Image (cartoon, rainbow, N blue to C red):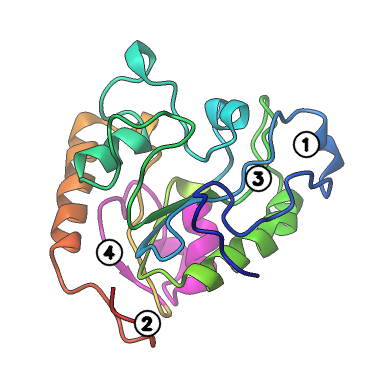
Amino acid sequence: MDANQRSRANPFGMDEECRNCPALCETRTNVVHGYGDVGADFLFVGERPTATADELGAPFAAPGGADDAAGTSLRRMLERVGLCDATSPPERPRVENVYLTNLTRCRDPDRRPTDEEVDTCEPYLNAEIRMINPEILVPVGERALEELGEEYTTTPAEKLSLPETHATTIRGRGFELVPMIEPREQTDDQTQAWLEHFVELMASDYRQTKGRQER
């Protein structure tokens, strides 16, 4: 699978007409595959597309303007740490060194994904992680932390929970995890704590020895 970095939207050319989950085919607007820099050090993983992401076809898309107060969306947080251009459109944010994706690619507006749907989408996520080979995985929300923690760390499951691990670094197998409470559920203090921790991480020697070429 080759990347097409001329497009940050679905750069690995994954199936945009996927029908592996028939129930979700009836409720989705778009199949929302990953978006961003295929050479990214930082890979953010949510549970499912937001309502705006389903409409626009880009992960973590937020409506912007008065409907998206500062600090309440992942995009605004990325802007604050200098990884997203604040002037770029919501459906095509200009992110650098960042890749955005979800456990599942389709949205049911009335419920969260089932375990079967997460398992069905797992090959998409696994392919993205394998191809990008990031340094830092950021699970956004409890479900993403559960799935990534089980796969990529040796930390006991009972110690992988939010809000306890929010704005901390967890050593993984080939990656480090920096969990985050879902942005719209964060208090101002929790948002500030995560931003400060992440800025400190970005300034550190976070790159691990995995055979990656230097940027």
Amino acid beneath label 4: Thr
x and y percentages locating residue 46 in the rendered image = 50, 46
- The residue labelled by disc 1 is 24
Q: Earlier in the sequence, mark 4 or mark 3?
A: 3
Taking 117 as reference, is 4 left or right? Answer: left
The disc at residue 212 is 2
Instruction: Report the magenta residues as a range.
Output: 144-172
Q: Nearer the viewer, mark 1 or mark 2?
A: 2
In the image, what residue occupies the spot 45% across and 45% down? 141
Earlier residue among tags 2 and 4 = 4
Q: Quadrant of residue 67?
A: top left
Marks 4 and 3 sit apart, C-alpha to C-alpha, by 26 Å
In x, y percent, where is residue 145? Answer: 46, 56
Q: CA distance from mark 4 to mark 1?
A: 34 Å
140 vs 168: above or below: above
Measure the C-alpha gap from mark 2 to mark 3.
Answer: 28 Å
Q: Nearer the viewer, residue 163 or 124?
A: 124
Circle 2: residue type: Arg
Q: Secondary structure at mark 4?
A: loop
The residues bearing labels 1 and 3 have C-alpha atoms spaced at a distance of 9 Å
Q: Is residue 129 magenta?
A: no
According to the picture, the residue beneath numbered tag 4 turns out to be 169
